[in-house]
């Protein structure tokens, strides 16, 4: 394929230029090794001026803990094995004491952040959330609260009958530090209708990010793929993220992972393999030229593929993740501590460094 200015698509990518959706579909079909090499080159271009010029040499990670404050949810996503209804014997809402125990353990391990998400609980009140945020901020000021995905915020706005901007603003005032990109799945409504018909639509997901970025909150962006979507749907998802980043500029990183089908209602003929994961991550690095960090998903792919992903566009190894409940509910239970993460990073030829949510080295 040749671009209008006469350069090959490969040369265009190596020069750091923006590619179109049509070009993304073209490059996606190239041999995996070629796609990986192009993604690695784009990774180096994106990182060469970071960390005092040493960004190409460094791979970061964070010590944090996932805290799922409730598993009660009324949207019943077909791909989720984590949610429960209030009628289920194993439904829960964490107590303040349980939160403190988890945060004490995180602090003792040198952690700097919690990733706090939960189901769409129909009965938890606005003050429950504000009081919890105030409590964590006052008792654990060193811990960033990276919490509440866009579908949760849309749920809050509807349940509390409040403008979305007011909900996010009040949460920020109470202690929220940043927003995870969960619930993005695929930002194509025809896909969302098939896998999660009661969850917020694509425009609503992006609306949360627009408002949050306007209010000064940074966020991550995600994609969960390998279910009912097409390659064209994946590219459309990436296009919407890139357009949103052009508009609001608040995405710090992109993370993609494959659908884990065990114990879920949603069934597929063949689980997505590691090669397809690497191909999709590499494409994301090339296409998302305005999102500086790409995170390897060892949580779903395992440590070895997570390490290989560092040569397919990733510059971050994610989290030590002292606790993980959602993916593990679907049967995937990889665990790594800081020592193992650093060994994997070194084994790939990079220098491991801890970071905070804003990709500042600590």
Image: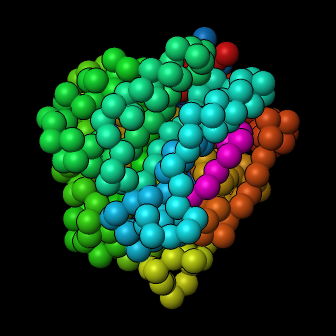
Q: Main secondary structure of the magenta part?
A: loop
The location of residue 324, given as percent across then percent down, is 64, 51
Viewer can see residue 14: no
Q: Residue at x 49, y 57 (%)?
A: 71
Report the residue at 67% width, 42% height from top.
Answer: 321
Q: How is the image coloured?
A: rainbow
What residue appears at the point 16 percent right and 36 percent down from the top-left corner?
162
Camera-side residue: 69 or 320?
69
Magenta stretch: includes residue 332: no
Query: Which quadrant of the rendered structure holds the C terminus?
Result: top right
Nearer to us in this view, 219 or 316: 219
| Magenta stretch encompasses residue 324 | yes
Where is residue 336? Give x, y as percent.
Answer: 78, 46
State the extent of the magenta-drawn residues as a range: 320-326
In screen coordinates, is 27 left or right of 164? Answer: right
Up-down relation of residue 113 to residue 324 (above or below): above
């Amino acid at each position: 394929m040749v671009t209008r200015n006469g350069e090959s698509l490969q040369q265009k990518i190596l020069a750091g230029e923006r590619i179109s959706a049509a070009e993304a579909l073209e490059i996606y079909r190239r041999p995996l090794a070629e796609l990986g090499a192009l993604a690695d080159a784009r990774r180096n271009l994106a990182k060469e001026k970071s960390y005092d010029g040493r960004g190409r040499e460094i791979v970061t990670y964070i010590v944090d803990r996932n805290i799922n404050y409730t598993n009660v949810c009324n949207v019943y996503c077909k791909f989720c094995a984590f949610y429960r209804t209030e009628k289920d014997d194993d439904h829960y809402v964490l107590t303040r004491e349980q939160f403190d125990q988890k945060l004490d353990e995180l602090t003792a391990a040198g952690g700097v952040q919690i990733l706090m998400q939960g189901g769409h609980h129909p009965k938890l009140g606005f003050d429950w959330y504000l009081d919890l945020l105030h409590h964590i901020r006052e008792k654990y000021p060193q811990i960033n609260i990276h919490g509440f995905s866009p579908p949760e915020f849309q749920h809050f706005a509807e349940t509390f009958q409040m403008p979305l901007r007011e909900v996010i603003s009040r949460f920020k005032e109470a202690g929220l530090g940043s927003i995870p990109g969960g619930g993005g799945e695929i930002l194509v409504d025809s896909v969302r209708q098939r896998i999660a018909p009661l969850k917020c639509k694509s425009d609503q997901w992006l609306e949360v990010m627009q408002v949050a970025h306007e209010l000064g909150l940074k966020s991550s962006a995600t994609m969960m793929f390998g279910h009912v979507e097409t390659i064209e749907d994946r590219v459309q998802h990436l296009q919407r993220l890139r357009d949103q980043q052009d508009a609001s500029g608040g995405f710090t990183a992109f993370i993609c992972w494959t659908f884990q089908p065990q114990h879920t209602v949603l069934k597929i003929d063949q689980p997505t393999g590691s090669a397809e994961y690497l191909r999709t991550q590499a494409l994301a690095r090339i296409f998302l030229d305005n999102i500086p960090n790409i995170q390897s998903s060892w949580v779903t792919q395992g440590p070895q593929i997570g390490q290989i992903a560092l040569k397919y566009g990733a510059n971050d190894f994610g989290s030590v993740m002292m606790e993980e409940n959602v993916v593990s509910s679907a049967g995937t239970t990889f665990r790594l501590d800081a020592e193992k993460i650093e060994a994997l990073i070194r084994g790939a030829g990079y220098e491991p460094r801890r970071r905070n949510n804003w990709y500042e080295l600590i």
